[in-house]
Image (cartoon, helix red, strand yellow):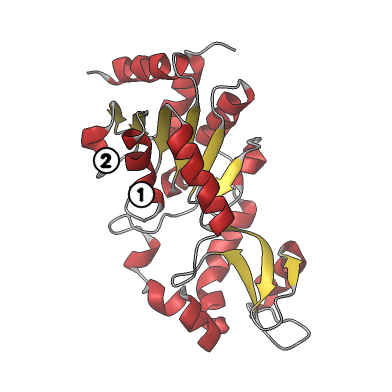
Amino acid sequence: MSLEDQIERAADLLRHARYVVALTGAGVSTPSGIPDFRSPRSGLWEKDNPMVVASITSFRTDPQVFYNWLRPLAELILYAQPNPAHLALAHLEQQGLIRAIITQNIDGLHQRAGSRRVLEVHGHMRQATCIRCYKQVPANSLVARFLATGEAPTCGCGGAFKPDAILFGEQLPIRVLNQAIAEARRCDLLLVAGSSLHVVPAAELPFLAADHGAKAIIVNLEPTDFDLRADLVINDDVAEVLPRIVDLLPG
């Protein structure tokens, strides 16, 4: 099947679905200049051991190690702009074709693109919490000084502030995760965009949706473990494919 035929098939599946949910991963944000974590040769974990730089255990031991690793990534996230994939998904939501976006991303680009119902199963960077007294502050109140000095931001109590993004060894936000599971069970079409489906529990959501009778579209550069069960697999750039699907839909 040609790419054009695949795009037409995706639009047809969306057109006839009753309740569509999107699941997005790092591949949706890479066109905005934010690197992913697991791609061979270019992923962040190719260079750094996540258990050393991005685990809750190492953070509690020495938060400065985490912040040294985070600093260039934080600058990329701060200045990144939504790309055509984000905008296409926001448009589909505004047209009532997508009911929720479940995302593994922490960059907030879906919201900046205009999406309203975004379930961030890996947390976000908008807020930070002191690991000692649990005081919460907007992250933007810490960003300027951190980017200027590189020093780990600290609370008045002496504890380190940790962004509300989930580190290795932390539990996912249970309320958000339960909402994501409910959406996977409810949808009759799941659109997976830019996710390798390697990280559980998000990687299990397509299987949960399929077990409840949902169809699935996968748009990702590389194959995934769910491809054999998907109704349509498009191995191409989400920033190119999703806008072309939108162009074929009403509104």
User: Pointers 1 and 2 in contact (CB under 8 A)?
Assistant: yes
Q: Which residue is rendered at x = 28% and y = 26% of the image? A: 231
Q: Name the residue under label 1.
A: 203
Residue 79 x %, y %: 63, 52
Asked whether, in this view, residue 33 is left or right of residue 147, the answer is left
Amino acid type at mark 1? Ala
Which residue is tagged 2? 226
Q: What residue type is labelled 2?
A: Phe
* Label 2: how many Cα within 10 Å (few below 14, some 14–19, many 20+): some
Frontmost residue, 151 versus 135: 135
Depth check, front residue: 88 or 94: 94
Compared across the picture, whether 239 is left or right of 38 comes to right
Q: Residues within 10 Å of mark 1 (few under 14, many from 20)?
A: some
First of labels 1, 2 by sequence position: 1
Q: Of the numbered discs in the image, which one, if any, rests on residue 105?
A: none
Q: Residue at x 33, y 34 (%)?
A: 210
- The quarter of the image holding the C terminus is top right
Can see residue 81? no
